[in-house]
């Protein structure tokens, strides 16, 4: 195979490696965001449950109203944390899919390069055999 074509394939493989590395880094970042969102969700849930279980002294209707507003606000925080966690999970899934696609594409180009190298080596061996056959044929004619 031609050296120019091999260089081109090599450059393409390098580009695919960089793309796969970038996709892996994006997935790692998305995973970190998902873990952080999950921790925030768990913490918000704990805070809400602790507020539900708290035995506050309620002496007036205003105290009851304040406690109700507080618990509702904590519940909204839990709901928002769950939404952020769900979004982070979907972003991580998309990043994982992109990473997988990039790895598959890289492997496809690596196989192309390997096949090109193997074809070049086979072509070289064929040329050497033909040259050896010509040398042997000349020797037979001469000798």
Image (tube, grey):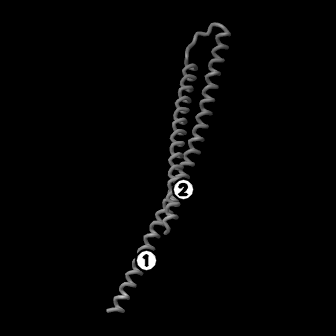
In the rendered image, which quarter is residue 33 located in?
A: top right
Q: Horizontal and vertical percent for residue 87?
A: 61, 37
Q: Horizontal and vertical percent for residue 85?
A: 58, 34
In the rendered image, which quarter is residue 71 located in?
A: top right
Q: Secondary structure at mark 2?
A: helix
Q: Is residue 107 left or right of residue 125?
A: right
Residue where numbered disc 2 is placed? 105
Label 2 Cα crowd, 10 Å radius (few <14 / some 14-19 / many 20+): some
Instruction: Tell which of 85 and 114 is nearer to you.
Output: 114
> Which quarter of the rendered picture does the C terminus lie within?
bottom left
Instruction: Tell which of 79 and 116 is nearer to you.
Output: 116
Instruction: Tell which of 32 and 110 is nearer to you.
Output: 110
Q: Residue at x 37, y 81 (%)?
A: 132
* Residue lying farthest to the front in this orientation: 142
Q: Horizontal and vertical percent for residue 60?
A: 65, 7
Q: Horizontal and vertical percent for residue 90?
A: 60, 41
* Residue lying farthest to the top in this orientation: 59
Q: Secondary structure at mark 1?
A: helix
As drawn, 76 above or below 97: above
Q: Is residue 121 left or right of residue 55?
A: left
Label 1 Cα crowd, 10 Å radius (few <14 / some 14-19 / many 20+): few
Q: Residue at x 37, y 88 (%)?
A: 138
Q: How many discs mark residues in the rendered view?
A: 2
Residue where numbered disc 1 is placed? 127
Q: Are dots 1 and 2 in contact, CB under 8 Å?
A: no
What's the distance in space between the residues labelled 1 and 2, CA to CA? 33 Å
């Amino acid at each position: 195979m031609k050296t120019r074509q091999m260089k081109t394939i090599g450059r393409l493989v390098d580009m695919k490696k960089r793309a796969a590395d970038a996709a892996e880094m994006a997935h790692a970042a998305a995973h970190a965001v998902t873990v952080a969102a999950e921790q925030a969700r768990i913490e918000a849930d704990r805070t809400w449950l602790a507020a539900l279980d708290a035995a506050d002294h309620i002496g007036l209707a205003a105290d009851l109203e304040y406690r109700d507003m507080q618990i509702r606000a904590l519940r909204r925080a839990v709901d928002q944390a769950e939404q952020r966690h769900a979004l982070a999970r979907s972003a991580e899934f998309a990043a994982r899919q992109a990473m997988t696609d990039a790895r598959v594409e890289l492997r496809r180009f690596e196989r192309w390069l390997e096949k090109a190298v193997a074809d070049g080596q086979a072509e070289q061996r064929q040329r050497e055999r033909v040259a050896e056959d010509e040398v042997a044929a000349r020797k037979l004619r001469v000798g």
